[in-house]
Each structure stands twice: as structure tokens, then as C-alpha cells.
Image (cartoon, grey):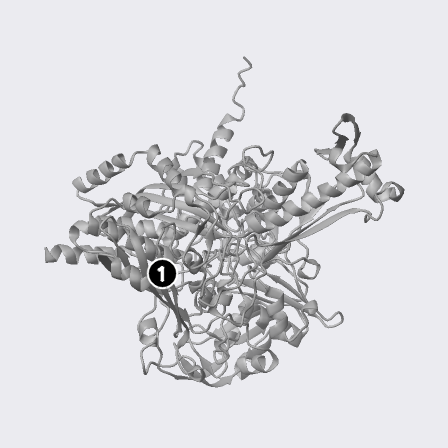
Amino acid sequence: MRIELDINGELRAVEVEPRTTLLDCLRDQMQLTGAHAGCEHGVCGACTVLFDGAAVRSCLMFAVQAQGSAVRTIEGVTPGPGEMSMIQDAFCETHGMQCGYCTPAMVLVAHALLADNPEPTREEIIDAISGNICRCTGYAQIVEAIALAAERMRGVNRPVNLK
Amino acid sequence: MSSPGHFRFVATERRVREDRRFVAGKGRFVADIALPNTKHVALVTCPHANARIVGIDKSRALKMPGVHYILDGHELAAATLPLMTGLDTPNVPRRPLAVDIARYSGEWVAAVVADTRALAEDAAEEVEIEYEALPFVLDAEKAIEPGAVLVHEAHGSNVLLDKTFVWGDVDKDFAVSPRKLSLRVKWGRSSTVPIETFGVVASWDPWRDMLDIYASIQMPRYSDQIGIALKLPVTSVRVHHDVDVGGSYGVKRGIKHTVLAGYLSRRLGFPVRLIEDRLENMRGGDAHGPERLFDVEVAYDNAGIVRSMKMRALENVGAYAGRSPFQLGKPIGAIVGPYKINSVQYRAIAVVTNKTTQDAVRGFGQAPTNLALERVMDEVANVLGLDPIEIRRRNMIKHDEFPYLIPSGTTYDSGNYETVIEKVLAAGSYAELKAERDALRGAGKLAGIGVSACLEPSGGNATFEALLNPAITTSTFMDSCRISVDGMGSITATMHTTSSGQGHETLVGTVIGEVLQVDPDIIRITRPDSLNSLPSGTPVGSRMAIMLGGAAFHAANKLKAKLIAIAAHDLGIPPERAVYEQGNVHDRDAPTFKRSWADLVQIAFRNYHRMPDGMEPGLSVAHVYQVPTGGTLPTADGRVHMYPCFSFEFHLILMSIDPVLGRPEIVRYRLGHDCGTQINPKIVRGMTIGGIAHGIGAALYEEFAYNDEGQLIAQTFMDYLLPSSHEVPAVDIFDHETPSPHTVLGQKGTGESGYLGAPAAIANAINDALRPLGISANTLPIKVSTLGDMIAAAKEKK
């Protein structure tokens, strides 16, 4: 089947089998390999993408269900080659990762959270990432990364006190 | 060793260089490797716990579109050798695909190769296999009973290993001790379960006689094992180390996967990719962890001083064995934990059963042993009415008693256990924690405080291999680093293995930057493939900070010595007067008389006439580093020195348990941690908290549970529960730094920290909470359901 969707701001058409998951379509047909397969049954969250702005599991969706929708992957939130978003930079600052396998999904969840809630509490951050399993870090430095990113993003455009 | 506290880059809050690629989704994991014309493998697995394979009918599957080949165990066995094992058990051969008999539910019986993974899965369903179900045995205790079903009939028994060691006069120590206590503790079958499953891409080039391997691997002697099994010279196996591994913590050993994919690529003439799906990973990935039953008896006095211990450890390794029985051996190097136990009897038994094969898990058997030891210490304290921290203090090795030789032959390098404990207690007084526990109890909860104190043997001197298998004489454990300065003066250093999140590129850069006094971020770190590599023991045994860090340190010092020699010669001064500073070399007596880095590069690369006589041109050095304090084999009486360094951790936690649901909650988590010099504190902290999270899983949630039919019933993440951000509490870490005298920067290992002590602390907290009800829990994981049932039964009794 031929589907058309908005991938990272670009309208693309792709030929998929009806049974192809959105995850496989992104990885195998669009070469967007930042979304990772972990459990392929919707528990670990490593395949998370932003679907019309919401963090969803691309392993639990068929690609055909994305017809006409806007999908944003980690490649789409990265500002440019070698250039990091504030959230990505905050993950680097706190070392909110180890092996990096769950990381793109965590970053996307953070993007979705902070778009809705610029001042999340620790509990809200923990809630937001609770559907994404990280086996390396025990989450502390991920929570710190998102809190740091929120703080920095709130500081953007705030008048600088020159005194 | 240099003393800590005066570093430029080491032990400072620097970023981890690997992180940049990961936050952008630009890690290069095995599933991202897309070689042209790659075909895909799906596995056909055995549905029975034990079954004879009567016939395999491939005809229908082979007719399906896109299907290229179906491989069975007979063909593969005829063309390859069995996989390497640790013990000499020739009648327990381990192969990638079952031959005649499949010995556990989920074992791989045939491999389908097709254009896509989806087509391979479709065809796998159409491979018709006729089985004759056989009786089976799942339980280790039943497996050692006379008349038990034999998992490998030719072996004659289910016992792979049964060895008893006696270190010191155990009989006398038991005879003179007024008190004895015994306890049975069980560590349940769990594992590290990385979010990335194991995967491999194998590509054979018949015109170059080369098998290229890309894999999510963490395994010593990987290319050796592939070469041996496939009957290829190791020079025809090229393992690419520049593949990011999506978590391992021990288990990414995928040798059977690699031999299978390697054979298929040679047989079929195109690249073959085998990426486990979650089901294949959980059932047939051969990545389960220890399942160990302990019977421990200790002899002690009225003051709580434990004089002697008898420990029997019965390990259920599953249907086949690779290195896994050795997980009974590593704990011998820290068998008394941080305590001055005078003598030990240790019986290690490894048996096969009809469960999934086990492999190495974080700590290599140390976490279960720590659990047993720490549970016993608590019970001794309880019998005597002593505080659990007080009994540990009374038994602990004191700071001024290092180096300390334990009965089994290892000498602990250094430690300051009493100070670490003081730091934890000073921060939030113990009395306050007890008051908080009592307040929870007053509010109707069950609540308990849990303590554990344990060691992390680090550095990876695996002489337990020789101790458990006398045919092994390996006493060399090494890692390596090569540094090259190019003709433009830039520095490139190498490491020779894959990494799975430990930040090794940061490690190498930081250490070399420290020695050469240059910004670590300008040093390029590369990972040559296995044919271009120097020896590496890979990231096992909590060894890389010590071993790769040590190799990088020595290589950098060789480079520095060469630069000094060139400068001194060119300046016409004796080398001892030449002072190296941030890449430049000057005359101690006339600091402006100097050669810059650029000058030295110019001389080394282009001005041979200015080089010292006989010196090699260029600026390339290498160092192969042997494990510190290593190089000895076991004595006839079963003693051996193992790991060089011993990190210490002290866990103090408060838990509350819902008295109706049995739901446990960790209310406070405090950890004292001492791993010597922390080369990168961000990495150390992450490893430590991550280890605790992993330990929480093993203690409360994670179990590869089997039903009575021998079916693995926890085979998805719906059933095998990994801790989420809700289950991992905030952890307060109190660092202390006791440098190791044996390492280049005073560093010790940290990759297993947290995991080694968290399960014991949790078990002790739960038992403290349950004690008022007169019940105890000594089988991990202590699940919500178990707790709820136990509490209800106890209340009914009352």
C-alpha cells in the first residue's frame, strides 16, 4: 500500500505492506534508525516517536495508520548536523544515558513533556518517562537531564540582568 | 600510583564523549548495519521442555516466496565444532541448533533464511517438526537425586561440577565456637536483559577468505571462538569493534548466534543477519543468569564474631554450559566479603536441567554470594539482639589491616570500610531512620531497615578458571592501547573491543590527556577491527578502568618518554634535565630553552638527522598491560590470588510494605561507595545507580519463571518485569576514595557496583519488616504476590 505522511516536516510517500509496523517502516524504508526495537510489544518504549505531537510506540502501530499524520523522530528534533537541541545537550551534561539504546526515545519523551509543561516537578518527569525502560542508568541522571533542560529552556529569552 | 587530588582531567565533572552521538540517535547499533543483499534469519524453536526430534519437514516452508534456505542441527553440526566451554565436559556438547534432542523449551532447532525478517518468520511457522516429548527435570535439587532424568545421557549425570574447598581449619573453628546458625537462601533465575536484544551480521567474502562480523557483543576471545567453531583460521575472522552495543552487563555472549550466521553466510554466499526478537531472546538467547541455592552455616561467638563459614552453592546452569559454571568460581576471590572470617568450607555444584542456558551476568556470580553472606550476618545479629550495622563493624577488616589476605588466597588491596559507613550514618542519622521506620509501623505499615556491606572485586584476574578446571593454565589477563601522533601533531589512540555503555572512549581520552597534559577532547579514539587489534580481555570483570585505563596510562608515558628523549637530544641536555609540560619540553635550568610539540613532531617525522641514535622515527607507541598482582596459578590446596582491587559499598535502606497487598516500597536509599579514584564521576554515578536499579529488579520483580510443564512463562516484558522510573527511588550516594595501591591512578572497578549489594539490602529490609510477624523471606525475587500471601498466612496464624 502507498501511504503519505509528514516525516520530520517533509511530505513523503512510501510503499508498505499492510502488516508493516511504523517502526519497521521508519527504520527499513526511510533509513530513520534512531527509533530502536526493544521488546516489540509496547512495554520498553525504545521505539517511541512523536505522532501528531504525542509520544507513541511505533512498534504498536502499523505504518498505514500513519497515513496523513505528522511523525517526528529523533532525527527531526535534532536541529542540524552535529548540532544538539537544548534537551539533547542537557542529556549530555548530566550523562543521562549509558549505552544509548533507549536514549532517542527518552529525548523525544522529554520533548513531548516540556512542550506541554515547561516547569515539570520531579514526579511529573518520573511519570513522563515511566513508560520507557532504561536498563543502564537507574533513571536518576535522565530525570536530572530533563529538569536541567526545563530550567534552561525557561531561561531562554529571559532578560539578562546586566548588573 | 600517583596520589589523587591533583588531577587536571581525571576525577573532574567532564562530559562523556560518546553521549553526543546517542542523543541524536546516531549510535551505530548492529541493527543499523545494512550491508547490500543481506538476508534475514528467523528461528524455529522447540515447544517442549525436552524432546527427541523425530523429523523435520522443510518442504512447505522452502516453497514460500523469498525463502532461501532452512538449516537444521545435523547439517550445522557436521560442518562445525561444538562451542567452547569452560569445564571439560565433552559429553555435554553445546551447539547453535539442537541435534536429535532439544533440551529446553525455546531451544533453536532450525534456522530459516529469507529476504526479510517477516518472510523468515512466516516460513518458520511452516517448518514442520515432529517431536517425541521426553521426561524432563527443571529443579537443581531434583536433578542431583539418584535416578533423575539425565539432560545429557552420555555425560552419565547432571552434575557438571562438584568441588569442595576447605580454606583454614574449619572443623576446629566450628568446634571452638559457642554458636552456630544455618540458613537457606535462594537467588532466583533472572538476568540483565538489555533493551537491545543480541544481534549479528555475518558476511563471508570467498575472494578474500574473510568473514566480517558485526555484532552486539561483549565477550572475551570472541573471534577465537568463531574461528575454532567454523574451522577457520582466526585471520579469516574480522570482528568490527566499532559497533555500539545496546546494553549487555555481561550477557551479550552471542557465540551460538554468530557461528550460525557465519556458517549460513559461507554456505549461501550473501550477508546474513540474525537479530533476536524479544521472544527468541528470552527463551533461546542463552542469556539467563544464575539460579543458585545456598546452604550456609556459620560458627560465631557471643559477641557476634563470625569465625568460620560453610557454604554450599547449587547452581542451575540450564541445559548446556559455556562459561556459566565459572560463576561459582569468581566469588571465591571475595568469599568472606569485607569480614575477617577465619576459615571457610565452600562446595560449588553446577548442574544441568531442562531450562534455558545460562551465561555471564554482571558480577559473574558475586551478587548471589553476597546475598547469602549478608543474609547470614543479619540473622546472626538478630539471634544475638545486635544491631545489623554493629555486627558488621565488629567483623570487618579495619583500614590499618590492609593488604589483607583472605583464607581462599586472595589479598584485598585497600579499603576503609569504617569511614564509608561513618559517612553514610553522619548524613542522616541512623536514629532518624529508625524513627521513620517506627513511624511507618505506627501507621499500620510493615517497615524495615536493610543493610548490606560488600565488595566489588575488580580488574578481572580470572584464575578461578584454573581453580575449577585444572586443564586451564591461563594466568595472563591483559588489555592494550596504542597511541600514534600523526605528522601534523594530532593524537589518535586505540581501544580493542566493543563497549556497551561504559564510556571507554572517554576513559582512554581522559587518561591519556592526563598523562600528556593535553585536552582529552582533542584526542581521537578509534576501535580497530579484531585483525588490527592488540589483545583485549573485553569489558568483563569490572576491569576496564583498571586495565584499559592502565594500558592507556603506560602507553602515554612511553610517548612522553620518547618526546623527552627527542627534546633532550635536540637541546643537547641530559634527559633528566628535560621537563615535559603540556606537550612542550624545556630545560629545567633554563625554562625558555625548549622544544614545542610542533618542533618535536617535526623532528620525529621529518628530521631524522636530529633524532637520538637508533630511535624509531615517528611517534607511535603501544602498551599491553597485564593485570596488576596477576600471574600466579592456584596452589595444590586450592588457594589462588584473583582480582587486584576491591571496591566497597555499604547500602542502608528503609522499606515499607503494604500489609494487605504486600506491595513493597523503598522509602530511603543511602549508599556509601568507595571505588578509589573516579576517573569520570558522571560515569561512576550512573553505573552505581543503574546497578542498584538492576538489583531492585533481581530482588523484587524479575524472574524467568517456569511452569510445571517446563515452559518459560515469563517470556515478555509483560511477565518479566523490569524496574521503571517508578520502582527506582532517589539514591543518596556518599563517596569515599581509598586509592588502590596497584593501579595507575588509584582507580578500582565500578561497573558492577550497586547490583552486588542492593538485593541483599532489600532482602534484609524485608526481613526486618516481616520479623514482627515471625516470618522470613529468603528466596529472590520476593514478589508482591509472595509477600501478600506470606503476610496473610502469618496473620491468620496469629
Label 1, secondary structure: give it: strand
Residue position for label 1: B344
Q: Is residue A60 left or right of residue B66?
A: left
The amino acid type, in three-letter code, at marker 1 is Val
Q: Is residue B545 left or right of residue B187?
A: right
How far from the left and from the top, in percent, is residue B772?
17, 49
Q: Nearer the viewer, residue B330 or A101?
A: B330
Q: Could one spot residue A131 in this view of the protein?
A: no
The C terminus of chain B - image quarter: bottom left
Dividing the picture into quarters, in which one does residue B415 lie? top left
Q: Is residue B60 above or below residue B442?
A: below
The chain holding disc 1 is B
- Tell me the residue at 41%/42% (across/down): B399
Q: Residue furthest top?
A: A163
How far from the left and from the top, in percent, is residue B254?
54, 65
Total numbered labels: 1
Q: Is residue B33 left or right of residue B73?
A: right
Q: Nearer the viewer, residue B663 or B669?
A: B669
